[in-house]
Image: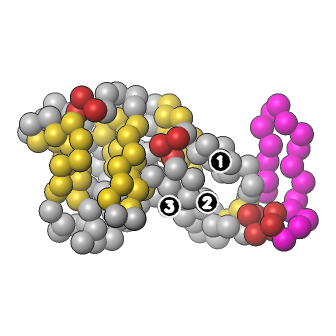
């Protein structure tokens, strides 16, 4: 079938409607060398294809915090950084590695304080409506899309 490794979809993170959907060709392996990311759009769905050090993965191209495109971020190993609030997510497991700087609620509802990078002044707890809204935004879990490689073509199952 292929010589590319495909990462398994983390438990309970399969995108709804993709289980029995047909595979659709979206790119070639040469379009996505190791260490690279590719954004795909189909209708109003934006997907991130990433060739991590552990293999290929397809997930939403939206930060699970405030929907910034992860494909604009940085891929390091199996982790992708969000370009907006510096959140970091493990593409192999779906875990939040570093919470966004705005703070907020994790997927289970636990609160995380705002934080600042080492080279920036500390961030205070939110005091205005906009900052409080950011601090109450839930960081959802990533959703994953089945993929396979056939004759050098990367194919993905889209929701039906």
26 left or right of 131? left
Of labels 2 and 3, earlier in sequence is 2
Q: State yes or no: residue 116 in magenta.
A: yes
Residue 147 locus on image (x, y percent) = 23, 50
Q: Which residue is mark 2?
A: 66
- Residues marked 2 and 1 touching at CB (< 8 Å): yes
| Measured Cα–Cα span from mark 2 to mark 3 | 12 Å
Are the two marked residues, 2 and 3, in contact with CB atoms closer than 8 angstroms?
no
* C-alpha span from label 2 to label 1: 8 Å
Q: Disc 2 on helix, strand or loop?
A: loop
Label 3 crowd bin: few (<14), some (14–19), many (20+), radius 10 Å: some
Residue 141 badge:
3
Of callouts 1 and 3, the N-terminal one? 1
Quarter placement of the C terminus: bottom left
Magenta stretch, main secondary structure, is: loop
Taking the image as drawn, is residue 11 in sight? no
- The segment highlighted magenta reads 113-129
């Amino acid at each position: 079938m292929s010589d590319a490794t495909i990462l398994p979809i983390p438990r309970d993170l399969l995108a709804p409607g993709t289980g029995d959907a047909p595979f659709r060709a979206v790119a070639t392996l040469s379009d996505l060398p190791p260490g690279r990311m590719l954004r795909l759009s189909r209708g109003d769905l934006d997907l991130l294809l990433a060739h991590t050090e552990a293999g290929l993965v397809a997930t939403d191209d939206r930060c699970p915090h405030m929907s910034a495109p992860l494909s604009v971020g940085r891929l390091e190993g199996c982790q992708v950084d969000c370009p907006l609030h510096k959140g970091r997510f493990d593409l192999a497991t779906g875990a939040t590695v570093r919470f966004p700087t705005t703070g907020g609620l994790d997927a289970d509802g636990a609160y995380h304080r705002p934080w600042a990078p080492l080279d920036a002044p500390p961030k205070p707890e939110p005091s205005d409506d906009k900052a409080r809204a950011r601090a109450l935004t839930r960081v959802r879990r990533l959703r994953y899309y089945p993929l396979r490689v056939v004759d050098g073509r990367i194919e993905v199952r889209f929701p039906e």
